[in-house]
Amino acid sequence: MGESLHTVATMPAARRPGCPFDPPAELVEAREHGPISRLPFPDGHQGRLVTGYDLVRSVLADPRFSSRKELMRHHPLIDYGEIEVPPAPPGEFLLMDEPRHGRYRRPLTGKFTVRRMRQLTERVEQVTAEHLDAMEKAGPSADLVTAFARPIPSVIICELLGVPYEDRGSFQDNIDTFLGGEVGDEELIAAYVATQSYLAELVAAKRANPTDDILSDLLDGDLTDEELQGMALLLLSAGFDTTANMLALGTFALLSNPGQLAAWRADPALTEGAVEELLRYLTVAKQFHRVALEDVELDGRTVEAGTTVILSYNTANRDPERFTDPHTLDLRRQEGGHLAFGHGVHQCLGQQLARVELRVALPALLGRFPTLRLAVPAEEVALRPEIADIYGVKSLPVTWDT
């Protein structure tokens, strides 16, 4: 272990032209040099990038690595020299450690169980059918993002949290703005403030008139309005943006792999495994951050206390030491255990909801439109920039035979 660490010069690294589903080549190359690399920040901080499956999983399960927002450098292009990063707002527990993390997550764990999410299947089927009916009526072409991928998870998460249907459009647009990675600071802040203002009004409305939804259920505890507002923001954004991008990017990947698409159409029993393989292959939540609370040895090297560690989920899910032929989409793959939903105490709370939505919506789309295909060359599909928190497509023009 005496050799020097490989250094990754730039983050976010760019994907290779014509390879929209593969992790950036620079990150794949870093993993080939070893599961951990050096990542310099503009202020001179020597961060670490973890790209190997076993090491990513290990860090996620290790309480010596913190998720606290105020301790880490979140963006490798920013000079953090004199910046004092504030703690995560109340309720936004993804960027917290125990006991604050548990205070917010525990009341929610019973709301997102496998059984409860499967009970939602019929409603997901109804919402999916409604949007496919509208697509078919307006066809024979559509932007799959706006007609299918965005509205389905949006309707479901809004119903779960008690967001009125008529407010869904503005909520979607604001979430897109501050997670899409394509606007300036002023516009981003405006969208974030507008969302927070709306959620404050929503929580107040639930206090005055509780309804049958998760947000109203949480009123029975000792959570403050500000805490409920933060929890709602986290659940709305996570429950909408990730699944919306999986639906669109997943369809793009299937249309780009006609052999796999034909296999799924021919054998509906593939659905559960196919969804897990798409989650592994695409890994739209590309990376998360941790910071070492003390000196920790990783892969035989010491990571010093205070070091920001970026965990590359997409290269971990393409690690050849964990997955056979990892850069191939194989819907019959038997190897499970992907990290698309993370691992450890912060593993995605809504993973079962996402699975239900993907298992219902993708087969329904493929069944409704047997001749579905891209309406533009694959290289013209507009992709989200790597700087976006969640990877995906901005639009996906499709067409079909009538």
Image: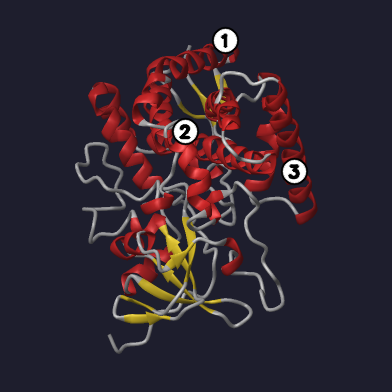
Q: Mark 2 points at which residue?
A: 247
Q: Residues within 10 Å of mark 3 (few under 14, many from 20)?
A: many
- Of labels 3 and 1, earlier in sequence is 1
Out of 222 and 45, give the one closest to the viewer. 222
- Numbered disc total: 3
Res 376 quadrant in image: top right
Note whether residue 259 is visible.
no
Q: Mark 3 points at which residue?
A: 191
As drawn, 88 above or below 120 = below
Q: Could you say whether the residue bearing mark 2 is in a helix, strand or loop?
A: helix
Q: Could you say whether the residue bearing mark 3 is in a helix, strand or loop?
A: helix
Q: Residues within 10 Å of mark 1 (few under 14, many from 20)?
A: few
The colour style of the image is: secondary structure
- Of labels 1 and 2, earlier in sequence is 1
Residue at image location 34% in from the left, 46% down from the top:
280
Marks 1, 2: nearer the viewer: 2
Q: Mark 1 points at which residue?
A: 137
Marks 3, 2: nearer the viewer: 3
Out of 130 and 393, give the one closest to the viewer. 130
Instruction: Name the spot of residue 285 as percent of width and height, x first.
Output: 47, 49
Note whether residue 111 is visible.
yes
Q: Distance between the residues labelled 1 and 2?
A: 21 Å
Q: Could you say whether the residue bearing mark 1 is in a helix, strand or loop?
A: helix
Amino acid at circle 1: Lys
Q: How far apart are marks 3 and 1 (CA)?
A: 33 Å
Q: Are marks 3 and 2 in contact (CB under 8 Å)?
A: no
